Structure formats: C-alpha cells, structure tokens
Image: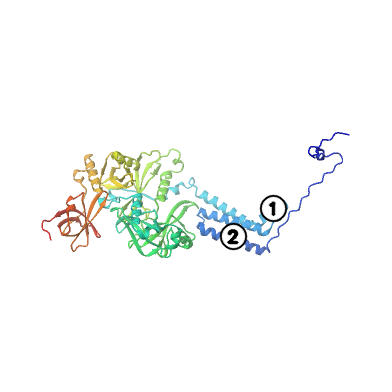
Amino acid sequence: MPFTFHFGGFDPNAFRQGEGSEQTPPVHKPRKTRKPIGNAFTRVLINLGVTLVFGLIYFYLQLPALNLHDEDFYVFAFLLCAVYCGCAVVTSGFQGTDLKGYVGFVKKQCAVPFFAILALIAVILVGAIASWVVLRAGAYSQLLPIQPGDFTAEVEEISYDQIPMLDKDSAERLGSRKLGELADMVSQFEIISNYNQINYQGRPVRVTSLAYGDLIKWFTNRADGLPAYIIIDMVTQEAEVVRLDEGMKYTTAEHFGRNLYRHLRFTYPTMMFDEPVFEIDEEGTPYWVCSRIVKTIGLFGGTDISGAVLVNAVTGESEYHESVPTWVDRVYSSDIVMEQYDYYGLYHNGFFNSIFGQKDVTLTTEGWNYIAIDDDVYMYTGVTSVTSDQSNIGFILTNQRTKETHFYRIAGATETSAQASAESQVQQMRYTATFPLLLNIADQPTYFMSLKGADGLVKMYAMVNVQQYQIVETGGTVAECEANYRRELANNGLIGTEESEPEKPASAMVTGTVAEIRTVVIDGNSHYFLRLTDDAHYYVVSAADDADVVILNAGDAVELTCDSTAEGTIVPAYGLEIKADQQ
C-alpha cells in the first residue's frame, strides 16, 4: 500500500485530476436586467428635468455667458450633455450581456447629446483656427489704432498743486485709517482694495466701495445696504467717507440676487463683461462701470470693448451704453490696452518677423500709470524693443474711455531705471520709489515719483528726466522738488534760466481779519487753513513757504496772495503779510 502523506488534513491528490476524473464547470448567474422607468416619453421628461435642474444650479453659481464666444459656455454645454447621458442610462435600465451590448445601449440612449458634443467640438476647432494668431496676425496688429504724437504740444504742463501724489498702496493706508476713525462703521465694514483713479469735479481722486466684514455682518446690515464709499484726493491726500442717504445694495460684496455679477448675468445673459469698476458721477452718485467684452477675430481672438453697462449701485438700475457718458473715466482696462499694443508691436510686420529677424518688434514695459488730460484719464506705459530691456524707445498714452492712443517716440530710461536712479539719490535713507507718473515739466518729458519709507508713508518726491536719467532731483515737497529739477535742467542747458522757476497761477490779493485757524500736517509740513471774517473760503498757507503763519492768531489783520483760478472752498495761498493794525 503506497504511503500517503496528509499535512494537517490537506491532501494534495485531491487537486490532481486523474484519469476518468470529472471537473464541474463554474456556474454563472445570469445578469439581472434593470427595468426601465416608465415609458419612453416619461424617461425623456425625467432626463430633461434632471438636466434642467443641474443647469439652473450651475448657471446660478458659475454665471457663464450664453455666448459662443465665451469659453465657459462650452464647459456648461458639455456638462449638460454629460448629465443627460448619465440620467438616460439610469432611467432606461441596463440592456445587454457584454461590453459590446452595453456600448450599443449607451449610444442608443445618448445619440442626441453625443451628436451635440461633436457639433460643439467642431465649432471650437473651426473657431480656434479662425482665431489663430499665425493666420490672423494682421488683424491682431490692427486692434489698437495708434497715432503719432507730439508730447510737448499735446501734454500740457500742470502746476504742482494738480499733480496726483498717491499710489494705490498709499491710498489704501489712508482709506483704512479714515475708516478706523468711524466707530459706527469700522466694526461692521471693510474696504474693497480697488481704489480706482478717476477725475471728479476737476480733481484726480481714487474711489472705492465698502464691503461687509463677513457673512454674519451681511445678514445684519443687508437691509440698509452699504452706507458709504471712500474718496481720496490724490493731491491734498485727504480721505473722506461719503455717507449715502440710501445704502448701496448692488455691489461685488453682495450675495444672492444682489451680487453685482449675478445681477449683470441675469439682466444680460448673453453679454461678456470685464471686471466691474467703481466710479461716481459728478453729483457723487455711485455706479459700477461694467465694460462689455467682444471677440473680434474668429470666435475666441481679438478681445476688445464695445460700450459698457452702467449699474446704479443704490437702486440696481442698469443701462447699456454703446457710447458711454463723458463722466465715465475707465472703460478700457490697462490689461486690454497693453495686450492690444503688444499685438501691434509684435505682428505689424507679420507673424514670422516676430520670431525671425524681429525687425521693429516692440513691447510695452511691465508697469503703467495714469495721467489726467482735459478731464479724461489716460493710461501711460513705456515701449521698449523686444531685444532690449534697459531703455525705452517711447511711450503711449491711451484715453481709457475712448481708446484713443498716441505714440510718442522719445528714447530714454525705462521706468524701473528711473526708479533706481531716484532711489540712489537718497540711498542713505533707503527710500523706495513708487512707479512713476509721466509729466511735462518745462517741455521736458519727466518721470515723477514719490519716495516712501519703510513705514509706507511718503517722505520725499523725485523727478527724473526721461531722456537723460542722470538728471534727478528730490525735494521734501512737490514745489521744492520741481524748483530743484528746473534749476538742474537749466544747469544742463536744457532750458533757459528764465524757465528755471516754476510758474505760479494767476494771483489775487485778499485782505481781512483772521476769524478761524486750522492746521494739518501734510508730507511732514504744517499747513494752516485760514478763514477770514465774512469769507467762506479757507486759504491754505504752508509753514515751509511762509514761517510767519505760525504766529498768527484769530483777530490778526492779514493780506494774502492766493490763486485766483482756484475753485471750491479751499484756496491755495502763496504769500502772507501780517498787518500792524488789528481789529
């Protein structure tokens, strides 16, 4: 009898198939077929209903424009088709015994969405080819019509008391400090950090809206809306919280139907919009300027602006203007303007020239700033050769309302080089220069910038000649800086000696008795606001210009030399004489 070894009851022979042995084939249970829901018409209604609900929720949250030019529209359409197909498979049950049967079943249920997806893909491909810059380089180069300009003839000199001295960072600090002084607001609201630059009643200012501190504070304050906005004078550096009789209920800080983006989408479902900009009209009414984006080359290329929708921030009333009112300052964003110029600079001699040869290929520099001309705000940026980053060949000025653009061919330093030159002038103080403004000083293109300390406050000012950036002067005030700069221009033979002193505005003599004196420190200098008896104006005298102002008392008789062209309650004064006789 052969020896058989059993290990732990395990018999290996039991797994060997000997002669005459039989193996029972595995038993497969038949796949259970799910029954379809209702009849075909009922299933279609269910599928459409689920897709519609999904579409409404997605549209409410993501707000795609119902426009073939909007890339987000195709994402929306693809998702709708996918949801319908998934729902159709579920409601129709599974029919088929293998993979081939399953695929055939899905194709049968999703035929319409499938062909819709194919059609959308075809539209995307055709539209992308029609927008391809390789084929349409000429069209891209013509997006921004450019006119040659004469800088000294077209850009007038402005007096130092009209120069905007605040950058966005400084405006944010002033705005936050002002809001912090208001106990009834600081605990409930915060500031939207846009600070858009506009011209308001002939003055360059920055304006921005408030926002709710958080969602709970929105619930407790939403009935009244946002009660105020902030306006900062860029010349005097005064921040003001403008309280409204009725609060703003349509802003980017709102939720649900009053959210500005949602309000725009539901009112104009097919329009595409640039980022809304907060502005105020000449009466101080707050508006959102919502520039309408259009694609002008193929389906997806040639981003441009065609008018704007103006939304009243208080009432939500909106109106589309193909030609916007003149009080609106910003319709074209700096990003769109610079993108369109770059298309011109790269492709006006053809696409392949931008890669091979690169004859006359130019680009905008990295930064930009704004300048006020004739009550419009112009964006300025430098233009440099694509092969050089050390110097500019000129710069452009673009009207942000009309897109009228002038190119000024003035070779000189880049903005960053000018900033470095200004900082080196005060290197022992380690001040940081802001991005420069472009000014006309004595018919010389001049970079003007503020010099800020480590605390972010403006300490000094600098002017750098664009064409000869080794000519740089600083000053504790704008007037002092300009005077030093003009004298340096005269020393270098760029202007005559008679032009070395800044022009003062037309003056007038005012005499009277001091009724009230107020003081404020601006840029480290004390300014005295004098109101005379029976006179509603406040005459501003800087202690740096006339030290006698510090010994004035109410009741002193004075004679002031002031700006006769000044409008408003506050009038700059340039001379002070204290009379011996007093009342």
Q: Amino acid at mark 1?
A: Tyr
Q: Amino acid at mark 2?
A: Thr
Using residue 243 as the reference point, say whether residue 52 is left or right of it: right
Q: Position of residue 415 (x, y in %)?
A: 34, 43
* Residue where numbered disc 1 is placed: 102
Using residue 200 as the reference point, say whether residue 76 is left or right of it: right
Q: Position of residue 479 (x, y in %)?
A: 24, 48
Q: Nearer the viewer, residue 566 or 324?
A: 566
* Residue where numbered disc 2 is placed: 51
- Figure check: 244 above or below 462: below
* Quadrant in which the C terminus is drawn: bottom left
- Figure check: 311 above or below 132: below
Res 411 seen here: no
* Quadrant in which the N terminus is drawn: top right
Q: Position of residue 502 (x, y in %)?
A: 22, 48
Report the number of numbered marks: 2
